[in-house]
Image (spheres, rainbow, N blue to C red):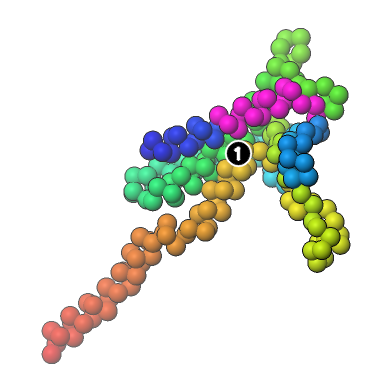
Amino acid sequence: MRRSIFTILLVLILDQVSKVYVKLNFELYERIPVLDGVFQLHFIENPGMAWGMSLPGVWGKISLTLFRVIAVVVISIYLKRVIKEGQAKGFITCVSLVLAGAIGNIIDSAIYGRLFTRSTARKAAEFASEEAPGYAHFLQGKVVDMLHFCMEWPEWVPYFGERGGEIFPPIFNIADAAISIGIIWIIIRQKAYFKKDQESNKTEEELPSETEGVQASTEL
């Protein structure tokens, strides 16, 4: 339980500190190179889901946020169960990463619209006040993204090098990274993490044959 709580709190703190800093100090679409030609901070706001997809209208935005809340509740219940069952520590950490990432993006959607003024290409946002109200209602805020790998395909790479462009164009945040790392690592380590379930299923499949053997010997 402590490992899970620590993982969730660490991701949430890093995620929210980075988002608040960028929101208050970056103009919309501003770019700051960190590692030239490889990585940069590029501030954008995502109105919907990952990859820039969104549901139309106010109710579409509210529905998306509520869906995220339901997902967090389901993942929380599942996490509590796997901790109780004594699943592998690595698996618990991965589920905790996914949960923390989901919570991190819900915070943006739920309260950032009320907490901050609107970010523009000419001015960074400020904390909302009576004189300068927030840019959106509750549950209608935008998710702050800023991490961007800007590496481009080398010319010698077949097909991609000829077309040019970035190797990984999406702009994301720490919450997105936590979700991706958690899911990818579960997929990579699935044989180890679900070994108990596989052994349990195998044992259940073997039981009928053993029972049949006992019955056969009795009949003899």
Q: Is residue 198 visible?
A: yes
Q: Is residue 173 above or below residue 161?
A: above
Query: Magenta segment, which residues?
Result: 13-28
Quarter of the figure that contains the N terminus: top left
Q: Residue at x 70, y 17 (%)?
A: 127
In terms of secondary structure, where does tag 1 sit?
A: helix
User: Total of numbered circles in the picture?
Assistant: 1
| Residue extending furthest toward the bottom | 220
| Residue 4 screen position, x and y as percent | 43, 39
Q: Is residue 156 above or below residue 46?
A: below
From the viewer's side, name the closer residue of 114 and 3.
3
| Residue 207 screen position, x and y as percent | 27, 73
Main SS category, magenta section: helix
| Residue 212 screen position, x and y as percent | 23, 81
In the image, taking residue 83 as reference, residue 131 lies left or right, namely right
Q: Is residue 139 visible?
A: no
From the viewer's side, name the closer residue of 18 and 151.
151
* Residue 65 in which image quadrant: top right
